[in-house]
Amino acid sequence: MGEPEMAFGGGGTGGGGEVVVDVRDLWMRYGEKDVLRGVSFEIRRGEVLGLLGPNGAGKTTTIEIMEGFRQPSSGHVRVLGEDPLHGGDAWRARVGVVLQSWRDHSRWRVGALLEQFASYYRPYTGRDGYPGPYEVAELLARVGLSDKADTRVGALSGGQRRRLDVAVGIVGRPRLLFLDEPTTGFDPKARSDFHDLVHALADLEDTTVLLTTHDLAEAEKLADRILILDGGRIVADGSAEQLARQVAGEDEVRWTRDGVREVHLTPDGTRFTRELFERHGAEITELEVRRASLEDTYLRMVARSEAGLEEPAPDEETARERTGEPA
Ligand SMILES: Nc1ncnc2c1ncn2[C@@H]1O[C@H](COP(=O)(O)OP(=O)(O)OP(=O)(O)O)[C@@H](O)[C@H]1O
């Protein structure tokens, strides 16, 4: 296969709707264990996708396959139009990665390290519309490390190192960015700054983002769409609101009347509240309506899926056939 035509040009669509990641019927087996069991999904340009799931669900494995770091047992995977296992340098230049643990560059100074990474991308500047990597000063400002340019990496705090990981992931101005638990160890301000950064990348630069996180509030804030992976399968795919509707969560309405605190669970909090006011008007104070949060939805969906897993796994035989491995 020759040079990837799609790597810089964006496939010529110039707008939303272009499929940036296409994964179909992906299986991954480690030894005797099927870690991914028929995973299929698409990510479209400019979308921020949150990949959620319990420890060991297969999130990192999925991301590593899409980065070309792991060969799946079977399945169709296209990332920016290429099979990640055969993506060349130009393809790799457009894919940014923030892994759970980055290689140690503790003796490097922050600015020099980023300059080194930026230099890998520079030769591709101008090719098929590629704008080139970030200038280091701009990048440091974006991740909140402007005053650390001359600091050795080994002298950064855990959260500052994580910001540096993010800087390394985006230095090449990727079209597609993989973020594997990016905000672990961030303080609330760093987390909030990071959320602003992801919004800016998605909204202003049309960067497509795939994010794994165990912080459901973060997923709710950042992700346009959420995939829940459990037991190697996708058990939910939709916006946080769509998923909440699917589990038919009840709204919790709380209020005070005549000094008495009341709580009521209802499928339609808006309607209940309207009727409450029609009946009691100004007597109602301290009203709160709480919708099912992503956390409620997630916990219910994972519990539901894990209850389902008690049933015999239907595709075990098929998986063996696919991987060609012995039973
Ligand atoms: N190289 C490997 N060899 C064998 N098993 C592996 C390997 N890498 C991962 N696994 C197993 O595959 C399963 C999925 O792991 P993975 O790291 O993809 O999960 P995850 O969803 O990212 O988990 P976490 O939330 O804990 O990061 C786990 O049971 C893990 O033990």
Image (cartoon, rainbow, N blue to C red):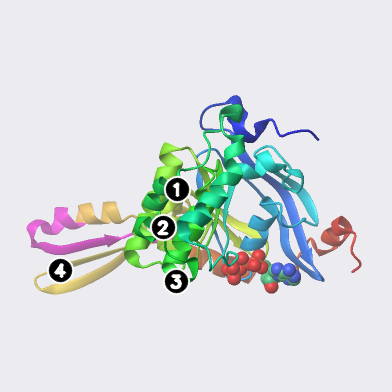
Question: Which residue does the image show at 36% across and 61% down from the upper left?
Answer: 190
In this rendering, position of residue 325 left or right of residue 22: right
Q: Residues within 10 Å of mark 4 (few under 14, many from 20)?
A: some
Q: Tags 4 and 2 in contact by the CB under 8 Å rule?
A: no
Q: Mark 2: which secondary structure?
A: loop
**Disc with the residue nearer the chain's start (3 vs 2):** 2
| Between 264 and 49, the one nearer to me in the picture | 49
Q: Residues within 10 Å of mark 2 (few under 14, many from 20)?
A: some
| Between 1 and 75, the one nearer to me in the picture | 1
Residue that label 3 marks: 155
Above or below residue 295? Residue 80 is above
x and y, in percent, of residue 111 in the image:
46, 55
Residue that label 4 marks: 256
Q: CA distance from mark 4 to mark 1?
A: 55 Å
Residue that label 2 marks: 149
Q: Nearer the viewer, mark 3 or mark 4?
A: 3
Q: CA distance from mark 3 to mark 2?
A: 12 Å
**Disc with the residue nearer the chain's start (4 vs 2):** 2
Residue that label 1 marks: 136
